[in-house]
Amino acid sequence: MRNIPFFLLVLIMISCKDSPQKKSETEAEAVPVTAEKEKYPPTLSEVFEAHGGLALWRKQKHLSYEMPKKSGLEKHTIDLYSRKDVVETEDFSMGFDGTDVWLSDPEGKYKGDPVFYHNLMFYFYAMPFVLADDGIQYFDTDPIVYNGITYPGIGIRYEAGIGTSPEDEYYLHFEPETHQMAWLGYTVTYRTGKPSNDIHWIRYDNWMDVSGVLLPKSMTWHKVEEGKIGEPRNTVPFQMVEISEKAISEGVFTKPENAEIRKPVNTSE
């Protein structure tokens, strides 16, 4: 959703043509459906469909959810087209206004890196749909086995220059019968800028239907033991989830006057 979807561009082009060309318009409108399916690996398209489908997802304008944590409640709000976002807590807030990442932390309580964190949970939460973004490459990956069940998978990497850590790799694994997403493996290269073989694993097995879109009710990180998925480590719940076809006010993402602009950590050091 970072860019205007291909099917919208086709519809715009069609609207500029003369109205008598009914047959050609009908044929042109049918093209994007095939093109969309061919753009992704067939198994990934089936995963999208198992979660409500890309067509429904791309109608949505914004997403919000709350994360109850020991430190307090976090509310995340995201514009699904511009990818502007804001994270709000009782003590601090951070976000992306379309140009800069900002942090408003009057009492200096936030100890992390807002450039890394401001949209981190969104990309985990909006799986598998964010894997339809532009600038993504897909590759074959071996299935994983957990508790005697084999989960087929798809490998994902980003093209150079996409995001703050394009060297990251992701591994989506799904239920063999339903094609619902079951696991996400991922590497973290943000602070090093170098490829990594250290794969972290998240279990997706608690879904809820929100306006026809299947979204996580919780996600569970697992320990990794000798390269294999181990026992659960911690579970992150989500509540007050809302996804809507209505646009949200741009003012929600505006940098507060007391906020400071933050830049990525220098990974060359």
Image (cartoon, rainbow, N blue to C red):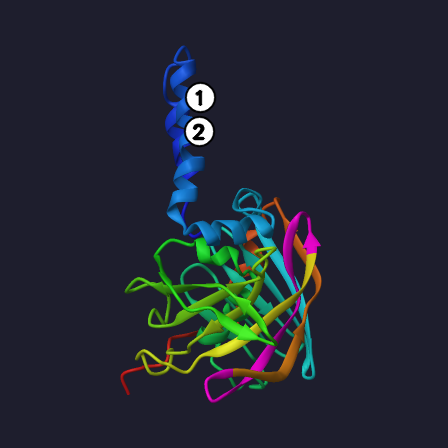
Q: Is residue 214 magenta?
A: yes
Q: CA distance from mark 2 to mark 1?
A: 6 Å
Q: Residue at position x 57%, y 75% from top?
A: 146
Q: Is residue 155 above or below residue 14?
A: below
Q: Position of residue 239 (x, y in %)?
A: 72, 65
Report the amino acid beneath label 1. Thr
253 to the left or right of 41: right
Q: Position of residue 203 (x, y in %)?
A: 59, 72
Is 1 situated left or right of 266 in this image?
A: right
Q: Are there few (<14), some (14-19), or many (20+) residues within 10 Å of tag 2?
A: few
Residue farthest along the front direction in this orientation: 148
**In the rendering, which numbered label is found on residue 30?**
2
Q: Which residue is mark 1?
A: 26
Discs 2, 1 touching: Cβ within 8 Å:
yes
Q: Residue 158 at what x, y percent from top left?
A: 35, 63
Magenta segment range? 209-228
Q: Amino acid at mark 2?
A: Ala
Residue situated furthest right in the rendering: 240
Q: Residue at x 37, y 81 (%)?
A: 197
Q: Main secondary structure of the magenta part?
A: strand
* Label 2 secondary element: helix
Q: Is residue 224 magenta?
A: yes
